Structure formats: C-alpha cells, structure tokens
Image: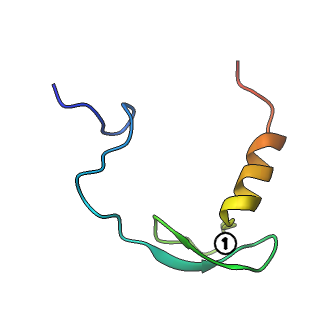
Amino acid sequence: MAYGGRFGGRRRDFPREMHKATCSDCGKECEVPFKPTEGRPIYCRECFQKHRSERPSRW
C-alpha cells in the first residue's frame, strides 16, 4: 500500500507548483502550494502559524 496521499502524510516524489501571493496580514510577498482563490485570505508562513495557534483545538 502506498504511503502518503490525502490523509496519510506528505508525498515528496514530485515538485509542487508554487504560486506567488501577498499575505493578507502583513502584506509580505510569499509563495503557496495552491492556486489562491479570490476572496479568501492568504497568509505567509509566519502569519499562518500565528493564526493556527489562535484556533481552538478540536480535541
């Protein structure tokens, strides 16, 4: 059985296409591994970690 995929961890056997974006919080240029959707916030690595730690845990 292949390891990785949607819920089983990261796959590293192909390069990810990166897309340029501007962080919605700090305005810094960054790259994200998905195509940004209009109307949804994009965060740089630092701001993403800040927002992630502010969310309540689901457990």
Determine the residue located farthest toward the left in the rendered image: 1
Q: Position of residue 2 (x, y in %)?
A: 18, 31
Q: Position of residue 3 (x, y in %)?
A: 25, 31
Give above or below for 7 relative to 18.
above
Q: Quadrant of residue 18?
A: bottom left
Dot 1 lies on which element? loop
Q: Residue at x 24, y 59 (%)?
A: 14
Label 1: how many residues lie within 10 Å, few (<14), some (14-19) or many (20+)? few
Q: Position of residue 21 (x, y in %)?
A: 59, 79
Towards the viewer: 16 or 56: 16
Amino acid at pointer 1:
Gly
Q: Residue at x 67, y 66 (%)?
A: 44
Q: Residue at x 71, y 56 (%)?
A: 48
The colour style of the image is rainbow
Q: Residue at x 39, y 33 (%)?
A: 7
Give the residue at mark 1: 39
Give above or below for 26 relative to 56.
below
Q: Is residue 2 left or right of residue 8?
A: left
Q: Is residue 26 left or right of residue 35?
A: right
- Assign the N terminus to one quadrant of the image: top left
Determine the residue located farthest toward the top in the rendered image: 59
Q: Position of residue 43 (x, y in %)?
A: 69, 65
Give above or below for 31 relative to 2.
below
**Total numbered badges shown on the rendered structure:** 1
Q: Quadrant of residue 30?
A: bottom right
Give above or below for 7 relative to 19.
above
- Assign the C terminus to one quadrant of the image: top right
